[in-house]
Amino acid sequence: MARDEKAKAKKEQAKGKAKETVGRAVGNERMTAEGQAEKAKGDARQAKEKAKDAFRR
């Protein structure tokens, strides 16, 4: 289960980074903001999983 969540976090981070980059390239502020939000969501999910791992050990 944790592996699935970690993979989901990495996927969200990558997708958000790509969306942010494309938004900046085409000058679309909304897409840039959506990408930043999605990346932040992935960062938060990854932090949560790392915290859970720390308590397991």
Image: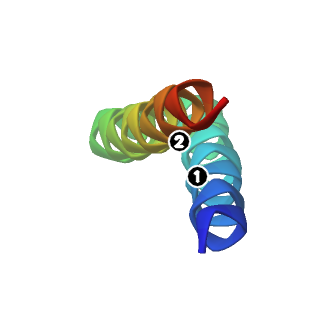
Q: Is residue 36 above or below residue 14?
A: above
Task: Residue at 50%, 28% (x, y): give it.
Answer: 55
Frontmost of labels 1 and 2 is: 2
Task: Residue at 48%, 27% (x, y): give it.
Answer: 51
SS at badge 1: helix
What amino acid is at disc 2?
A: Glu
Tally of numbered tags:
2
Locate residue 47, reporting x and y percent: 49, 28
Disc 2 crowd rating (10 Å Cα; few below 14, some 14-19, many 20+) is some
**In front: 55, or 16?**
55
Locate residue 33, reporting x and y percent: 31, 34
Query: Which residue, as the protein is rendered here, is positioned at the far front?
Result: 57
Locate residue 5, reporting x and y percent: 57, 63
Query: Looking at the rendered structure, which numbered label has been put on residue 24?
Result: none
**In front: 13, or 24?**
13
Pointer 1 residue: 9
**In front: 34, or 25?**
34
**In front: 36, or 8?**
8
What amino acid is at disc 1?
A: Ala
Locate residue 54, reporting x and y percent: 59, 24
Q: Earlier in the sequence, mark 1 or mark 2?
A: 1
Task: Residue at 61%, 44% (x, y): give it.
Answer: 13
Quadrant in the picture for the N terminus: bottom right
Quadrant in the picture for the C terminus: top right
The answer to whether the residue labelled 1 contacts the one labelled 2, judged by CB atoms less than 8 Å apart, is yes
Disc 1 crowd rating (10 Å Cα; few below 14, some 14-19, many 20+) is many
Left or right side of 33 for 9: right
Q: Is residue 18 above or below residue 54?
A: below
What whole-number distance in Å separates the C-alpha atoms at marks 1 and 2? 9 Å
Pointer 2 residue: 49
Quarter location, residue 56: top right
